[in-house]
Every structure is written in structure tokens, then in C-alpha cells.
């Protein structure tokens, strides 16, 4: 398994500002994923972030709104840009464990509230 | 596209009663299937997974699930509910990329005394 730490765990943000969420993993992993969980909803994949390449975004998500960095095999950041109240969600970082056996491991999530 | 459908957004059971949470999948390839649990204000924890080995999969906290290809189902069960089982449960299937998972809408389990 992998231990994943996310910062911040929660934040209250003003409309129009941007916030960067950090994800730190205790082991080297190739594939990292960013999910969004809107209030009372399921998880929606935002993008896949592989070290050394540009992130791959899912339909409905664009790099200008959700820029992602993946500087090494243990760290990634997701920025939520020009926030609006509709961006109020939990953002979760996840990884496919070493010797991948199918499951993803998740961080505790970053709960953002946009006023 | 690989997807899962969870029947029932809310399920309520009495403590000690059988827990049954339903999940049906749609997949163009043999699927990997998962159940995750999310306790309030926490991340997701893997309960169990099916990866084409035994069709009856046992997980943590007394939960198990049975893969039924003929019914395209992967329902989660527990013989006797405990108050601590109250949480949100998500069924998930491996996506087309083979790595990221596609999640169902979730089922909120309420356990009453």
C-alpha cells in the first residue's frame, strides 16, 4: 500500500482566486490521479499525472482551469484556478500502488469551499 | 465504456441485520471491480476487489462480494451490520486506460439501533 498526504486538508477561498493542492506519496509511483468529489456526489476523474509527461485530462476538464505538476515520482500538485462556488468540492489524490494489482490508494482529500 | 451503477443512494438497516449494497457493471473487457468505503471527512479505503480470480471475494470488516458475470453484478454483503459500518460505499470498475477507476454514485449506509 501507499501512504498519501495532501495539503491543505481544507480551505475556504474567495471567488476568483487560485489554490494549489499538494500530494506527497511515501513511495515512488508512476501513475497518479486527481479526482473531484462534489458535495453528495461520486468521484470524477480530473486527470492522470505521469512523471515526465504532460497530464492527461478527462472530458470536461482543461489545463487552464486545473494545471497539474508532477516533478518527481513522489509528488504532484493540482491548482484550481479562478475559483467559483461551483469548484467547492473535495479534491482527492490517488496512486496505483507498486506492482499494480488494480486498486488505487487515496489521500484524505482536500476540502475546498469557495465563497 | 466501463461503468458501474449502484442501486439505491440510501440504504438503512438495523444493527445485526444483513447488509446488501447493489452494484451492476458494464464493461467491454473482463473487469476489475472494487468496493471502497468512505467514512465522514475521510478519504477512500479499499474494502475488497475482484481481479478475475475467485468469484467470491472476502474483504475487511466482514464484508464480501460475489462476482456474477451472468448478472453483471458485484453486490456487497455483510451478514450482520454494526453501527460502525455507517458510511458511504462506492463501487468502482477499472477504466478503459486500465488504471484509473470509474466510480458509481455511492450508497449511503445507515445503521439503526
Image: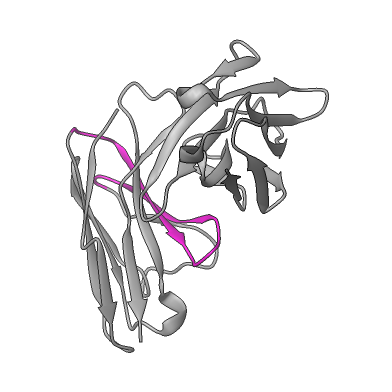
The color scheme shown is one colour
Image coordinates of residue B90 in percent, x first then y, are: 56, 44
Residue toward you, B97 or A93: A93
A66 is within the stretch colored magenta: no
| Residue B44 versus residue A22 in the image, above or below | above
Q: Looking at this rendering, what residue extends furthest in the front direction?
A: B113
Image coordinates of residue B57 in percent, x first then y, are: 58, 17
A31 is within the stretch colored magenta: yes
Image coordinates of residue B77 in percent, x first then y, are: 64, 28
* Residue beneath the point at 30% across and 27% down: A1
Highlighted magenta segment, given as a residue range: A27-52
Dividing the picture into quadrants, the one containing residue A4 is top left
| Residue A105 versus residue A6 in the image, above or below | above
Image coordinates of residue A80 in percent, x first then y, are: 32, 72
* Residue beneath the point at 59% across and 36% down: B15
Residue toward you, B69 or A10: A10
Q: Looking at this rendering, what residue extends furthest in the top direction?
A: B54
Dividing the picture into quadrants, the one containing residue A105 is top left
Residue toward you, A1 or A65: A1
Amino acid at each position: 500500500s501507499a501512504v498519501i498526504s495532501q495539503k491543505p486538508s481544507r480551505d475556504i477561498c474567495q471567488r476568483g482566486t487560485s489554490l494549489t493542492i499538494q500530494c506527497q506519496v511515501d513511495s515512488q509511483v508512476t501513475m497518479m490521479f486527481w479526482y473531484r468529489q462534489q458535495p453528495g456526489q461520486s468521484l470524477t476523474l480530473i486527470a492522470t499525472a505521469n512523471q515526465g509527461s504532460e497530464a492527461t485530462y478527462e472530458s470536461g476538464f482543461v489545463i487552464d482551469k486545473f494545471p497539474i505538476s508532477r516533478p518527481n515520482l513522489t509528488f504532484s500538485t493540482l491548482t484550481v484556478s479562478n475559483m467559483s462556488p461551483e469548484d467547492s468540492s473535495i479534491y482527492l489524490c490517488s496512486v496505483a500502488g507498486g506492482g499494480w494489482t488494480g486498486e488505487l490508494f487515496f489521500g484524505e482529500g482536500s476540502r475546498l469551499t469557495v465563497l | 465504456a466501463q461503468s458501474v451503477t449502484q442501486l439505491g443512494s440510501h440504504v438503512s438497516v438495523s444493527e445485526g441485520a444483513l447488509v446488501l449494497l447493489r452494484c451492476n457493471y458494464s464493461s467491454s473487457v473482463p473487469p476489475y471491480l472494487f468496493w471502497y468505503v468512505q467514512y465522514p471527512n475521510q478519504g477512500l479505503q479499499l474494502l475488497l476487489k475482484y481481479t478475475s480470480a475467485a468469484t467470491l471475494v472476502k474483504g475487511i470488516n466482514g464484508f464480501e462480494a460475489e462476482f456474477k458475470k451472468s448478472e453483471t453484478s458485484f453486490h456487497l454483503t455483510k451478514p450482520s451490520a454494526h453501527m460502525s459500518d455507517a458510511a458511504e460505499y462506492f463501487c468502482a470498475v477499472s477504466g478503459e486506460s486500465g488504471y484509473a477507476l470509474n466510480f458509481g454514485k455511492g450508497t449511503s449506509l445507515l445503521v439503526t439501533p
